Image (spheres, helix red, strand yellow):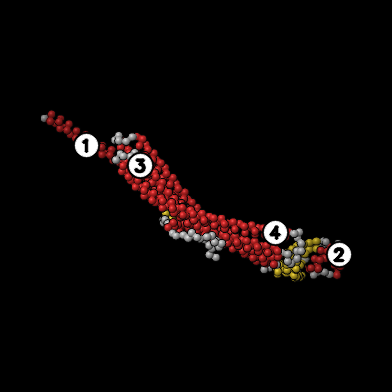
Amino acid sequence: MRQSVGVGNNCYRLTFSLKLLLLKIKLMNKIKRLIKWGVFLFIGFPGFLSIAQAQDLSQKLSLNEAVSAALANNKSMRLAGLDERIAKSNFNQTQAVFLPQVDLSYTAMSTNNPLNAFGFKLQQGSITQNDFNPALLNHPSATPDYMAQVEVKQPLLNIDMLYMRKGAEKQIEVYQYKTQRTQEYITFETTKAFLQLQLAYQAEKVLAEAGQTAKSVYTFTDNHFKQGLIQKSDLLNAQVHVAAVESNLARAKSSIRNASDYLSLLMGQPTGKIYSIADEPQTNSQAIDSTKRVFATRSDFMAMQKAIEASGLMIKSSEMSYLPKLNAFGNYQYNDSRLTGFGANAYLVGVQLSWNVFNGNKTKHVIAAQKLERDKLAVQLAQQKNQSQMELDKAYRDLSDARFEMVQDQAAIEQASEALRILQNRYRQGLVNTTDVLTADTQLSQLKFSLAQAQFTANVTRAYIQLLTTTTTK
């Protein structure tokens, strides 16, 4: 009986120990799970936040939206608008050619000068018989005079100022055309920046596809190396190829950020946002008239033409300064010996005809310098037209070259894709080495990027042709 009891106790103790061990194992598993979740939250949560922040910073953008924002907020557009307003303000200043000038003054004086003292009393209308006493005339005491006066000057005929006013009016047109040309250039520059962003995304896509191919080759090579079927040099070549593709992909992502920052600068927005392409402009598929030429009515040409006309009016103004000027004037005044008095009043009106007969040949040399400045503007305008025509002819040739390159690249991509597929199949069969596959993959990626570059060149060239051949609506 004792033995059976002892055996029972031992069995009970063993069972209890097993249960305790299982409980400890379950507890340790729960602790491990908690630790894993804690590590995941510690590592993954900041990554999740960074992804969320990146999504917040990302914004879809279309070409029309980018151009509209740039025209509304670009600093160059604001400066052009300010220049135009300054020109209008300068023109408004010339209203003085027609409007009078009115001055109001109040003057307090005191003197013991015999002539002035007697004149003060005459103006005040306070002369008495005693004031003619020689002793008082020769040695007057301090005599005060308080004078309130309104003085008016009215231009009547100033031919030189009329031509100067016309020249200032021409300056308004100059800056209006400059504003229009700034708008056209900002449109082109924004389009170019948008296309650069599109090219960066295309490069990222090409490199991502190349990365997938490189990793699959590396995985296949690593498995066969572990099986002893290929040499280690093949594995190292695959590793180097993967690293090179990843480095190029990182640079492509940086290019996306750089292009987005430049777009933000053009649109007058804070940098840091990453824009994604909402539409892909395919302007290269549109027909273009290669016989189109640079027009004289382009806004920057018109601005220079108006500047030449304004210079001609300023020359005419200087020539008209030889003629006499006719102006009217008048004043009304109160004189009194008291500070707050308005005892005597008087007026004076008149018309003045003045003529500057000779000023040391200053006007002559001013006119000569103005004519030279006008001739300089005319030469600059002709030079700019010739240069623009040369740039337009070059742009047509660049567009033709880009189109030809696109056709060639598309055919080459089809051939390179087929060659890579064949080499991959032969590689799996052990008929070609790793270097051949990696070289074919690199060649395909380069051809795809070359096609994207040719499309970018064609699109930018078309936008530049539009900038060169646009005409003003005025």
**Mark 3 or mark 1, which has the lower sequence index?**
1
Q: Is residue 20 left or right of residue 322?
A: left
Alpha-carbon span between mark 2 and mark 4: 58 Å
Q: Looking at the image, which residue is at 38% across and 51% down?
A: 411
Q: Looking at the image, which residue is at 44% across and 57% down?
A: 283
Residue for badge 4 = 368
Helix, strand or loop at mark 2:
helix
Helix, strand or loop at mark 4:
helix
Residue for badge 1 = 19
| Whether residue 420 can be seen here | yes
Residue 444 drawn above or below residue 396: above
Residue for badge 3 = 437
Residue 274 drawn above or below residue 472: above
Alpha-carbon span between mark 3 and mark 1: 60 Å
Q: Looking at the image, which residue is at 43% across and 47% down?
A: 252
Please tell me whether mark 4 or mark 1 is closer to you in this view.
4
- Tell me residue 422's x, y (percent): 32, 45
Helix, strand or loop at mark 3:
helix
Residue for badge 2 = 137
- Tell me residue 365's x, y (percent): 72, 58
Name which residue type carries label 2. Leu
- Tell me residue 341's x, y (percent): 74, 67
